[in-house]
Image (tube, rainbow, N blue to C red):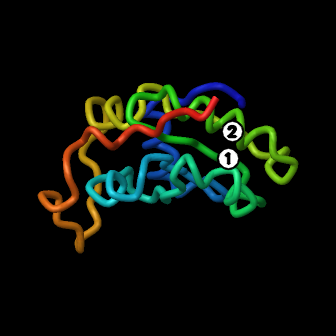
Amino acid sequence: MDGEIDPDDLAALLAADEEGLRVVDIRDRRAFDRGHIPGSESVPFPELTTRVAELEGASRIVTVCPHGVASRQAADLVGSYAGTADARVESLRGGIEAWERDVGDLVANSDTDASATGSDSDEGPDAPF
């Protein structure tokens, strides 16, 4: 892992349409569908080890979770994969909570009914280690 990135800095990268940037949201799919950072992709933490190969070829990878804790572990895991050895791998400092506070709203998937998907209590993955 190459450290953490502040929400404002990530927003600037996204606005510049940084080539090779991948923003990986490790929350469960329901939480992602309710609201996520624009341009991010859902790779739930339990699936990360089996899907890390999908990140090959990225030049910069930012992992995202609710509060910026589990995403540090995810960034360590992604950074240890041989296929991402040349990528800069960072965790979003403060997670989704900091993004909403410092940058702005999240994007919801249009076909998601937030009332049908439950509460926010299922948003954070349990770290397996």
Residue 11, position as x, y percentages in the image: 43, 43
Mark nearer the N terminus (2 vs 1): 1
Is the Cβ of the residue at disc 2 closer than 8 Å to that at disc 1? yes
Q: Is residue 102 above or below residue 78?
A: above
What residue did someone put label 2 on? 89
Query: CA–CA distance between discs 2 and 1?
Result: 6 Å
How would you rate the neighbour count of disc 2 (Cα within 10 Å): few for under 14, some for 14-19, many for 20 or more? many
What residue did someone put label 1 on? 60
Residue 43, position as x, y percentages in the image: 54, 56
Residue 32, position as x, y percentages in the image: 36, 55
Of residues 2 and 117, which is closer to you in this image? 117
Q: Residue at x 70, y 33 (%)?
A: 76
Residue 79, position as x, y percentages in the image: 75, 39
Of residues 103 and 124, which is closer to you in this image? 124
In the orientation shown, which residue stands out farthest toward the left? 115
Q: Residue at x 32, y 60 (%)?
A: 33
Quarter of the image that includes the N terminus: top right
How would you rate the neighbour count of disc 1 (Cα within 10 Å): few for under 14, some for 14-19, many for 20 or more? some
Element type where label 1 sits in the image:
strand
